[in-house]
Image (cartoon, helix red, strand yellow):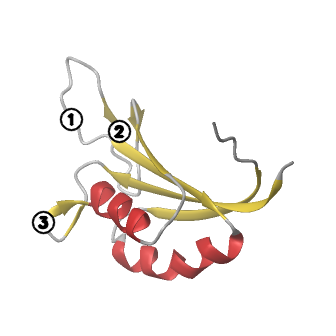
Amino acid sequence: MLSDGMLLRIYIAESAKIGKKPAYRHLVEMFQKRGFPGCTVFRGMVGYGHEQVIHTVDVLNFSMDLPVVIDVVDTKERVMSIVDEVEELVEHGLVITHDVKMGRKQK
């Protein structure tokens, strides 16, 4: 049975840092410490952000500062409890939420 939930999605550059640590790593560790059930980081093949510069894995063009997408899904209450903190930590990026239906499968 599916239940109501919320997706927190964060778009950042692979080179983004929080302190001295890669931002994606910092965020994953933060979600884990806060007890979120899971977090996934996706590395993009090509993309651009607010500066309108295209970054790609093209072998002839080693820009390599690829886009990264971080997804976390939990209840709306849990996601909303951390959104403000995430927005403060992400200096250059995009933080969005979506209402979702979720179902957990366990072995």
Outermost residue on the right side: it is 1
> Alpha-carbon distance for marks 1 and 3?
21 Å
Q: Is residue 84 left or right of residue 107?
A: left
| Residue under label 2 | 54
Q: Is residue 70 above or below residue 20?
A: above
- The answer to whether marks 2 and 3 mark residues whose Cβ atoms lie closer than 8 Å is no
* The disc label shown at residue 63, or none: 1
Q: Is residue 37 left or right of residue 29?
A: right
Towards the viewer: 104 or 47: 104
**Label 2 sits on what residue type?**
Ile
Residue 100's quadrant in the figure? Answer: bottom right
- Crowding near the residue tagged with mark 3, few <14, some 14–19, many ≥20 C-alpha atoms within 10 Å: few
Give percent across and percent down for residue 68: 38, 46
Residue 44's quadrant in the figure? Answer: top left
**Label 3 sits on what residue type?**
Lys
> Alpha-carbon distance for marks 2 and 1?
9 Å
